[in-house]
Image (cartoon, rainbow, N blue to C red):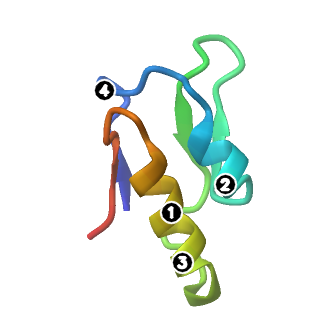
């Protein structure tokens, strides 16, 4: 999984959906990937977070 911070607009949708995997940077407000390889039981929520990103800044390999 990856986050393209150059595309991120800081909407925070991913953090709301999966706060254990994503957080927002305190200074810039952009998404920070906490867990690059989240546990398999989080797959559906991580996918929902990626799909909910308004600028598609989250990539799932």
Q: Are marks 1 and 3 in contact (CB under 8 Å)?
A: yes
**Which mark is first along the chain, 4 or 1?**
4
Q: Which residue is mark 1?
A: 48
Task: Give the residue drawn at x 67%, y 58%.
Answer: 18
Please give the name of the residue rendered at 26% of the width and 70% of the height, measured from the top-left corner. 61
| Label 1 packing within 10 angstroms: few (<14), some (14-19), many (20+) | some
* Residue 25, numbered label: none
Q: Is mark 2 in CB contact (under 8 Å) with mark 1?
A: yes
Residue 18 lies, with reference to residue 5, above or below; the image says below
In the visual, does 50 lie left or right of 31?
left
Q: Which mark is residue 7?
A: 4
SS at badge 1? helix
Q: Which residue is mark 2?
A: 17
**Residue 16 relative to residue 6: left or right:** right
Above-or-below relation of 6 to 50? above
Depicted 53 relative to depicted 42: above or below: above
Name the residue carrying label 3. Answer: 44
Helix, strand or loop at mark 4: loop
Real-space CA distance between mark 1 and mark 3, rounded to the nearest whole angstrom: 6 Å
């Amino acid at each position: 999984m990856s986050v393209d911070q150059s595309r991120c607009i800081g909407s925070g949708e991913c953090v709301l959906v999966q706060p254990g995997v994503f957080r927002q940077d305190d200074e810039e407000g952009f998404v920070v990937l906490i867990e690059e390889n989240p546990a398999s039981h989080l797959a559906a929520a991580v996918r929902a977070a990626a799909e909910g990103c308004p600028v598609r800044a989250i990539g799932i390999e």
